[in-house]
Image: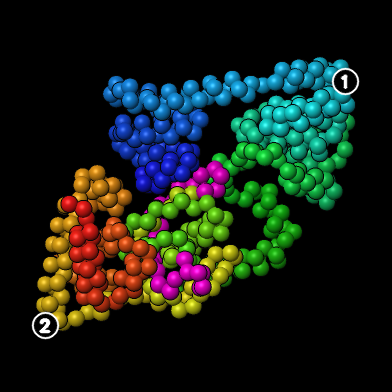
Amino acid sequence: MLGVADEACRAGDFDLAAEIYTSQLAELEYTDRGLCLRKADALARGGRIADALDSYCIAANLQALRPDELQILVEVIAHTIRTKEQSDEPCICRLLAQRAELLMEMKNFSQAIKDAATMCRLRPLWPKAHYIKAAAFRSAGRNEEALQEYFYCLALKSDWITVKLEAQKILSHMFSSVFVNDDLATSMQPLPAGPSSRIKPSSLLSSLHSSLPRDGAKAGCSKYLATRAYNKTLLIEELLQRYFCEELAERRKVHEEEMKELSNLNQEVPIFVCTMAFPTIPCPLHVFEPRYRLMIRRSMETGTKQFGMCIADELKGFADHGCMLEVRDVKFFPDGRSVVDTIGIARFKVLSHGQRDGYHTAKIEYLEDKKVEGEELTELLKLHDSVYDQALGWFTSLKDDMKNQIISHFGQLPVKDSDPQGNPNGPAWCWWLLAVLPLENKAQLTILTMNALKDRLIAIRRVLIFVTRKRPR
């Protein structure tokens, strides 16, 4: 996970990095000072100065901060001050906001709406401008337009409690109107406020389809959805069973058949097209594309917690061989992204390529190493021990910083197997070495497809000889 966080920092995704550092700290029994500093730097670089200061304070409580550890904080604060001075809030918007509020007190709603519209045009990303505009629409009884502006406010400032409550009041009235129109009993009461027209369900859709300001923030319910703890309400469940019992039964049957079909990890295996993966080797993934979000969700819902990993192929879409991954942990973020901790468990050969709902699928057969006996086994054991010693010598000869980077991403070199044929995929150290050696994906894929341990060991030995000779002295 820390490797993914470091990659996120290098890519400029500081919020993701901070989320990962936070989750890692939460899992530790004792607070790690270095991890606190990395989290603080990520928060600062992401513009979250207040949160960063909290993390710096935690690190300082563990051990006094050195001046060089505060370099990023100083640079970010200086940049923030400089930016604020260059783009301070225009006085005209402040004056318009004050005048619009006075106009609403004077019941001059039309002019208040005009002033609010001018503010939104001058500063489309200022939440207060949209709030004043929504309040003016609301006071004038134009609730559909008010709801749209409240949604703008929440998109720009998702934690604004007052706006959430106002939007909920309008939505409550909308749903009450729907139930009244359909002669359904409901405990929800109509909205008790001034003149208002009946709101139609299409009003909500039009609000959702309206264009938000270019840099709109997360939706207000995103954090709730990220918990994956949502359920049907009692009201919705009762309505479904009462008025849509046949459709519900049909949908349940389709869902069960779909889950059964998706659980078959031979006929239609979901394929993540991204990078090389190897048996026994961790493969952390940052999932942000909608198609792969769906794929991960389905693999968790079916209980298999598995999917295939293949590299891309220009002609077929993805390669003819890959590695099955098993999900060990998933951390969801409010915007729908997730960090998925997986590990390779088995190799496979693709028999046919397919697609399902936007992501790739494949019919596969699993690969296993062919076992040998007698003299062939004796020669194999000698070759196995020889190549392992060669690999250990190469790894030991690396510089400390290079070794530390490898260990942080892949762990230590696995111990030598007493029975190299004990696992259908062969010794774990072979895959560890294949993952860390400087090889192109196509070369790694060639070795992955070999179903004879002897051939794989010979290929690895050739690579070790090549990298050893190429290294500068």
How far is the residue under mark 2 from the one under mark 1?
99 Å
Q: Position of residue 135 (x, y in %)?
A: 78, 27
Q: Main secondary structure of the magenta part?
A: strand
Q: Residues within 10 Å of mark 1 (few under 14, many from 20)?
A: some
Q: Examine the rendering and report whether any part of residue 454 can be seen.
A: yes
Q: Is residue 326 above or below residue 121?
A: below
Disc 1 residue type? Answer: Lys
Q: Which mark is residue 375?
A: 2
Residue at image position (16%, 69%) is 384
Q: Is residue 254 above or below residue 100?
A: below
| First to last magenta residue range | 312-337
Q: Position of residue 124 (x, y in %)?
A: 71, 32
Residue at image position (52%, 61%) is 295
Residue at image position (82%, 46%) is 200
Q: 325 or 38, which is in the foreground?
A: 38
Residue that protrudes farthest toward the front in the picture: 473
Disc 2 residue type? Answer: Glu
Q: Is residue 90 left or right of residue 227?
A: right
Q: 246 or 350, which is in the foreground?
A: 350
SS at circle 2: helix
Q: Residues within 10 Å of mark 2 (few under 14, many from 20)?
A: few
Query: What residue is pinned by disc 1?
Result: 107
